[in-house]
Amino acid sequence: MKYNLAHACIRVMDLDKSLDFYKKALSLNEVKRLDFSDYKFTLVYLSDENNKFEIELTYNYDTKKPYEIGNGFGHFALTVKDLETSYEFHKNMGLETTELKGLPGEKPRYYFITDPDGYKIEIIRG
């Protein structure tokens, strides 16, 4: 039996702020939006130009306090060809950005940024 990844869901406090972040910082595009006004939530699906995997932003209208990410979730990862240019772009955007890092004994090949809700995103040289 063959399985294909479809999407990962994260819950967000401010849908517009999150959309702005994912579109500007990571060049993701909105591919689908489902509004369930009667049930007080909206789902927005974002993907890259390949459309093979999506991030689902779930916005629940009545949430009053930030979600607890917990200690089980790690991060999302995206690849980019020019890591250094991407790093400077994110730093210039004023995003929370780690230093360039590498695994022990390796040259730097990744860094992390943080989205408006505190989710970590790893940017890897690809």
Image (cartoon, rainbow, N blue to C red):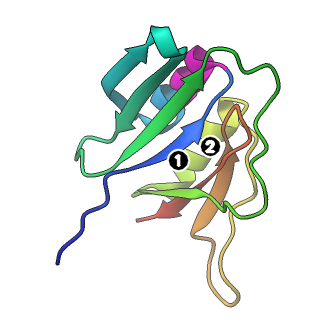
Tell me if mark 2 has few (under 14), some (14-19) or many (20+) residues whose alpha carbon lies within 10 angstroms of its own. few
> x, y (%) of residue 114?
70, 43
Amino acid residing under circle 1:
Thr
Give the residue number, with chain letter if any, for mark 2: 88
> Which residue lies most toward the bottom here?
105
Residue 2 located left or right of residue 17? left
Compared to residue 34, the image places residue 29 above or below, namely: below
Q: Which residues are magenta?
A: 14-21
50 in relation to 27, above or below: below
Mark 1 Cα-neighbour bin, 10 Å: few <14, some 14–19, many ≥20: few
Residue at the extreme top of the image, as rendered: 37
Name the residue: 78% across, 62% down. Answer: 71
Image position of 91 with respect to 77: above or below: above
Closer-to-camera residue (90/68): 68
- Percent across and percent down for residue 43 are 44, 26
Residue, far front: 38
**Which residue corresponds to mark 1?**
85
Q: Which mark is residue 16?
A: none
Of all residues, the one furthest to the left in this rendering is 1
Q: Quadrant of the C terminus?
A: bottom left
Left or right: where does residue 43 sit relative to residue 90? left
Element carrying mark 1: helix
Q: Amino acid at mark 2?
A: Glu
